[in-house]
Image (tube, rainbow, N blue to C red):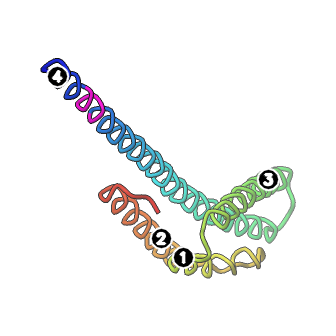
Amino acid sequence: MDDASWISLVASLLAFGTAIWSNKIAREAIRHGGTQRIAEFRKEWIEELRRNVAEFLMAEAQSRVLKNKMELMGGLPGTSEFTLSKAMQFHDAHLEAEARAARSLETILLSLNPNEPAHKELLGSLKPVWESRDDRKISHTEIIELTRKVLKTEWDRLTDEIMKGKVK
């Protein structure tokens, strides 16, 4: 084999090695990009759950306050036009708050995974709220604590997957 053949062989081997190395780097970039995108989806899910729980608790509390005001107005002596007008405003606002609470609660229930322990706990706390729409007694503190537990679990999972570069 002459020098030109050796040079040609070495150049071919280098080109082949470079192609293999480039392929490996491209695959790694694609995998990393997929991991990053899924991590972004998880982060969005975490933020959406936080917003929906806050909206639910706020709308539920507002609904309760408006219901109490309507009951108080119903107990006032006399039915002036002003009183009836205010009662109707409270009634309409109450229905709107109820609708917002129901919409948020449904979204929360659909967002949770019943197979995850922390999710299951939160579902257990929210299920009675969903089943009894009248005179519901909910503990905002309990729901907040259970939501924090779910959010922490998901955040830990997210950061762990980002650090390892793997998504489950």
Q: CA distance from mark 4 to mark 2?
A: 62 Å
- Dominant SS type (magenta): helix
In this view, the residue in front, 86 or 20, is 20
N-terminal of the pair, mark 1 or mark 2, is 1
Q: CA distance from mark 4 to mark 1?
A: 61 Å
**Circle 4 or circle 1, nearest the eye:** 4
Q: Is residue 2 above or below residue 76?
A: above
Marks 3,2: beta carbons within 8 A:
no
Give, as a three-letter code, the residue at label 2. Val
- Residue that badge 4 annotates: 7
- Residue that badge 1 annotates: 116
Is 111 left, or right, of 15 in this rendering? right
User: Which label was assigned to residue 150?
Assistant: 2
Q: Quadrant of residue 152?
A: bottom left
- The span shown in magenta is 12-17
**Circle 1 or circle 2, nearest the eye:** 1
Please state the horizontal and vertical placement of residue 72, each as a whole percent of the image: 74, 69
Locate the N terminus by quadrant: top left
Dot 4: element: helix
N-terminal of the pair, mark 4 or mark 2, is 4
Q: Residue at x 39, y 42 (%)?
A: 27
User: Which label was assigned to residue 92?
Assistant: 3
Please state the horizontal and vertical placement of residue 148, each as a whole percent of the image: 44, 69
Marks 1,2: beta carbons within 8 A:
yes
**Circle 3 or circle 2, nearest the eye:** 2
Dot 2: element: helix
Give, as a three-letter code, the residue at label 4. Ile
Is 3 left, or right, of 134 in this rendering? left
Q: Residues within 10 Å of mark 3 (few under 14, many from 20)?
A: few
Dot 3: element: helix
Q: CA distance from mark 3 to mark 2?
A: 34 Å
N-terminal of the pair, mark 3 or mark 2, is 3
